[in-house]
Amino acid sequence: MAQNKTLQALGRLPAGTMNKTEAAYEQLLKRRLLAGEIQWYKFEGVKLRLAAATFYTADFFVLAADGQLEVHEVKGVWTDDARVKTKVAAAMYPFRFLGITRGKRAIGWQVEEF
């Protein structure tokens, strides 16, 4: 828990700036784009309204090869707030929502569907 608080104390990066985990995941998306597994992706390109003054900005909006829009939320560590916002957005919008985290020892990616 102390490590999580330390990470949060560093503050957020400016909008449109990827952290190291997001940048690493983008490399995977680039490979998938070249392989034809996805048609398109955009980092922080879509902001969804959840309530009057509450918004959710997806890390990556991805257009799959089959035409389905997906939201890829990339996290080093999930906070309760991030998980709740993602679940609320998934319940409200007709996109496929995926939670993406690094695998153990930073090998591979773990995917959770909301």
Image (cartoon, rainbow, N blue to C red):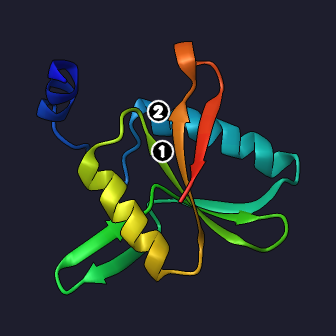
> At 22% across and 27% down in the image, what residue appears?
4
What residue sits right under mark 2 in the picture? 21
Gap between marks 2 and 1 measured at Cα: 7 Å
Crowdedness near tag 1: few (<14), some (14–19) or many (≥20) residues, C-alpha within 10 Å = many
- Rendered position, 1 above or below 28: above
Quick one: 75 or 29, which is closer to the camera?
A: 75
> At 37% across and 54% down in the image, what residue appears?
16
Q: Is residue 55 something one can see in this rendering?
A: yes
Q: Quadrant of residue 46?
A: bottom left
Q: What amino acid is at disc 1?
A: Val
> At 41% across and 72% down in the image, what residue appears?
89
Secondary element type, mark 1 = strand
Crowdedness near tag 2: few (<14), some (14–19) or many (≥20) residues, C-alpha within 10 Å = some
Residue 38 x %, y %: 78, 58
- Rendered position, 23 above or below 2: below
Q: What amino acid is at disc 2?
A: Thr
What residue sits right under mark 1 in the picture? 74
Residue 19 x %, y %: 38, 36
- Rendered position, 68 above or below 59: below
Residue 41 x %, y %: 64, 60
Question: Is 63 on the left or on the right of 34, as rendered?
Answer: left
Question: Which residue is at the far top?
Answer: 105
Question: Is 54 on the left or on the right of 31, as rendered?
Answer: left
- Rendered position, 112 above or below 108: below
Q: Are marks 2 and 1 in contact (CB under 8 Å)?
A: yes
Task: Tell me the quadrant of the picture where the N terminus can be found.
Answer: top left
Q: Is residue 46 something one can see in this rendering?
A: no
Question: Is 86 on the left or on the right of 99, as rendered?
Answer: left
Secondary element type, mark 2 = helix
Residue 103 x %, y %: 57, 24
Quick one: 16 or 12, which is closer to the camera?
A: 12
